[in-house]
Amino acid sequence: MGELQWALLIVCVVLVVALYVLSRRAKSEDGDDSTEDALLRGADEQGDQLDLLAPRKPPQGYDEYGVGRPRKRGGEPSMDAPKAREPASPPSVATLLKPSTQTAPAAAAVPARPVALIVAPTEEIDILGPQLHQALAMQGLRFGEGELYHRLIGGRSVFSVASLLKPGKLVPTEAETFSTKGLLVLMNLPGPVSPTVAFDDMLGTTRALAVALKADIFDASRQRVDDAVASSLRQDLQAWAKTHQLG
């Protein structure tokens, strides 16, 4: 190779090197190298594919995507987030038997006296929903608290009617698909009216329901309630009311 050819080859090599250095310097100034390095850090371990959505270690004070506040993990509640309220559940039958907080101050010290009657069919048949709700409505009972029916006086419940089957609810909109083995009529004394007046209303309503539903009436001990048993229950309530000075 002649001297002229060697000279031309050296010049070409120098030009190629110079152009490469200049191009790399221009990329470095534009920040392309940092972008390329960041994308390469998102590649999988085999290097087969770039995952642009792969989580990266965020700068301090930012979330995993580099924006906003750091996100807490592991169920830790945020100081700024309001606490979620748990949905309120309707009171149970046992709750309805507890002393009412609306009782007048003079009767606040009187111990609660629960009274219960059971309405059950005379034959081994279920009480169907449409027939049941019609009978309850005919006695002027109102659907309300606890999804039960109530005798209301001045907005307060004198006694309540529930299904014998748990959870005891009697929902009118479910009447077409509902049936029950019987009813539980509950009264918790003292209430908005005198014990004997409340019992008379409760007993009269229960008897009317039993006739409409072709059922019998039983007390809490499963004893059939005839006139003699009803009279005995009333006398017990009269004695209890007198002891606690209730009208």
Image (cartoon, rainbow, N blue to C red):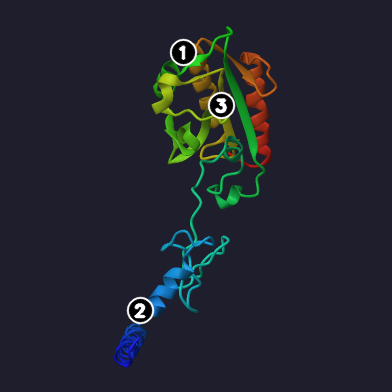
Decide: few, some or many residues near mark 3? Use Cα within 10 Å; few <14, some 14-19, many ≥20.
Answer: many
Res 212 label:
1
**N-term mark: 2 or 1:** 2
Q: What's under tag 1, amino acid-wise?
A: Ala
Is residue 64 visible in this depiction of the protein? no
Q: What secondary structure is found at the residue carrying circle 1?
A: helix
Q: State the residue in front, 98 or 108.
A: 98
Q: Is residue 217 left or right of residue 16?
A: right
Q: Earlier in the sequence, mark 3 or mark 2?
A: 2
Q: Which residue is mark 2?
A: 32
- Crowding at dot 2, Cα within 10 Å, few <14 / some 14-19 / many 20+, comes out as few
Q: According to the image, label 3 marks what residue?
A: 185
Residue 206 at what x, y percent from top left?
A: 52, 20
Q: Quadrant of the C terminus?
A: top right
At horizontal 30% and vertical 88% (from top left) the residue drawn is: 5
In the image, 142 versus 147, the foreground residue is: 147
Q: Of tags 2 and 1, which is closer to the observer?
A: 2
Identify the secondary structure beneath mark 2.
Answer: helix
Comparing 49 with 172, the one in front is 49
